[in-house]
């Protein structure tokens, strides 16, 4: 991002700004860029936050999203009705030469979901957060878009259209994942009926909230907002991907369904439809499973060749195991790697992977900060995935192939079998209760997530459902 263009725009749009002292990109943010901006003022320095789409490219052009201009307008509208938000000072235009983004007030608080569920400094506020989230969501859903002057900013989408739109994105990848197709069938069979469409934040979750010991001080990341079923927001914050290991507390890893619903009802005056929330919780795992594949596709096609996109692609199995736990829990056999075979290679492949990971963690991370340190950790975790796949992946894929051959009563290699099963699930020729289908999907997904992320809480849940109490050491 051009600091010169940024400084020129700040002088024109933000009173009191002087020279730019620094503009540093923060860690994280696979979908958008976030910067800490420091400028000179008459009395010293002033901090701001900058949000920009990756590379400055318009988010709407990339993914059909509303875009960062819409995000900024929505934050202003939400702030006006009492939703905790930073003040938005400057929304970029094409003439600014900075791409799609905006400059807003810098607020202090915790945004990392793992710290929000675990930091001692937030221990006293965590029991109140779910209720507060319910209150905030009710205020968001009550925003009058016409009165706020943003009725033409957002797309409107019904639950059935949202499902089909999401499912079509997945099918376009031509990378069949039968558990995703199974979940799509279930979602079609259980679509919410007679829904009143309202403003939906669409990414309201732990990780997009800024929290202090006083509570939520900002709701962030509005670029996915649309007009749709408001229960989507309540289901999304309960999706297991955003509990950060605290699966026993379904609301963001910090609260209960009951507190979330009570907070919502206290402001909206309307009872929460629990079945609709469960639907959108399942949809949340389905949606993010496809979102992870979309990240991998961006890496594979060169749209964003960074390690973060590639690594997030493997998180699809986390979401798929959550779908397993919702829809087809039951017995499973977790594969254990065989003893390391004797090898004339010095070093072996597993030793090379381990050495590279140790270098990233112990030397690169120790000597770097910020985004570089973050990406070093991502790269080290990617090497861990490769090491686990090296240890047990061949056995896993052989077992998966054998199960699908029996299920489909046909021969073939794994890719062709997955394609055939996905086709039968898509065209409805295989019912969801077909003998052996749930077992085959469950075994495949559980063993895949054990390779991709053996510490994921959804794997622990799947093993508990199977009567197993711990994950064998990989």
Image (spheres, rainbow, N blue to C red):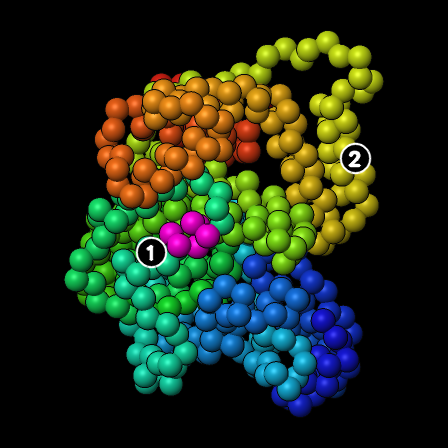
Nearest the viewer among 111 and 382 is 382
Element type at mark 2: helix
Position of residue 225 relative to residue 295, above or below, is below
Find residue 185 and report its horizontal and vertical position in percent.
28, 44
Q: Tell me the quadrant of the picture where the C terminus can be found.
A: top right
Q: CA distance from mark 1 to mark 2?
A: 44 Å
* N-term mark: 1 or 2: 1
- Identify the residue position indicated by label 1 in the image: 164
Element type at mark 1: helix
Find residue 8 and report its horizontal and vertical position in percent.
72, 86
Image side of residue 398 versus residue 272, left or right: right
- The majority secondary structure of the magenta stretch comes to helix
Give, as a single range, the part of the protein colored magenta.
Answer: 167-172
Residue beneath the point at 66% across and 77% down = 98
Residue beneath the point at 57% across and 48% down = 296
For disc 2, the neighbor class at 10 Å (few under 14, some 14 to 19, many from 20) is some
Find residue 237 and report its horizontal and vertical position in percent.
39, 52
Nearest the viewer among 351 and 462 is 351
Image side of residue 462 versus residue 192, left or right: right
- Identify the residue position indicated by label 2 in the image: 359
Image side of residue 13 versus residue 441, left or right: right
């Amino acid at each position: 991002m051009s600091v010169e263009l940024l400084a020129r725009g700040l002088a024109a749009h933000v009173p009191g700004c002087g020279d730019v002292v620094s503009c540093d990109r923060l860690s994280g943010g696979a979908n958008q860029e976030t910067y800490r901006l420091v400028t000179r003022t008459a009395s010293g320095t002033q901090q701001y936050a900058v949000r920009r789409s990756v590379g400055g490219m318009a988010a709407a052009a990339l993914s059909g999203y509303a875009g960062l201009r819409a995000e900024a307008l929505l934050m202003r509208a939400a702030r006006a009705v009492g939703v905790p938000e930073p003040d938005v000072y400057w929304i970029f235009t094409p003439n600014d030469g900075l791409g799609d983004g905006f400059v807003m007030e810098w607020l202090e608080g915790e945004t990392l979901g793992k710290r929000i569920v675990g930091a001692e400094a937030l221990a006293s506020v965590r029991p109140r957060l779910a209720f507060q989230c319910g209150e905030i969501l009710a205020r968001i859903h009550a925003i009058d878009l016409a009165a706020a002057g943003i009725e033409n900013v957002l797309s409107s989408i019904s639950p059935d259209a949202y499902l089909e739109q999401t499912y079509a994105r997945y099918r376009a990848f031509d990378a069949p994942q039968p558990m995703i197709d199974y979940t799509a069938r279930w979602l079609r069979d259980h679509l919410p009926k007679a829904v009143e469409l309202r403003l939906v934040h669409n990414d309201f979750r732990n990780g997009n909230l800024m929290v202090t010991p006083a509570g939520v001080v900002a709701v962030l990341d509005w670029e996915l907002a649309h007009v749709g079923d408001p229960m989507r927001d309540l289901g999304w914050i309960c999706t297991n991907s955003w509990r950060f290991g605290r699966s026993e507390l379904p609301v963001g890893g910090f609260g209960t369904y009951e507190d979330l619903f009570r907070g919502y009802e206290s402001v909206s005056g309307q009872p929460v439809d629990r079945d609709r929330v469960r639907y959108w919780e399942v949809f949340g795992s389905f949606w993010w499973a496809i979102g992870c594949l979309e990240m991998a596709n961006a890496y594979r096609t060169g749209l964003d060749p960074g390690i973060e996109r590639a690594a997030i692609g493997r998180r699809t199995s986390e979401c798929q195991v959550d779908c397993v736990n919702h829809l087809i829990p039951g017995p499973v056999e977790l594969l254990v790697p065989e003893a390391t075979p004797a090898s004339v290679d010095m070093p072996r492949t597993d030793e090379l992977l381990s050495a590279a990971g140790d270098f990233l963690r112990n030397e690169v991370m120790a000597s770097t900060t910020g985004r570089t340190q973050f990406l070093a950790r991502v790269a080290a975790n990617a090497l861990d995935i490769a090491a686990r796949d090296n240890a047990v992946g061949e056995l896993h894929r052989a077992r998966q192939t054998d199960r699908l051959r029996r299920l489909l009563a046909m021969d073939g290699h794994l890719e062709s079998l997955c394609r055939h099963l996905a086709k039968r699930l898509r065209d409805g020729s295989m019912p969801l209760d077909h003998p052996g289908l749930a077992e085959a999907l469950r075994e495949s997904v559980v063993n895949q997530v054990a390779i991709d992320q053996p510490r994921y809480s959804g794997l622990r849940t799947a093993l508990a459902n199977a009567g197993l109490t711990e994950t064998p050491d990989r």
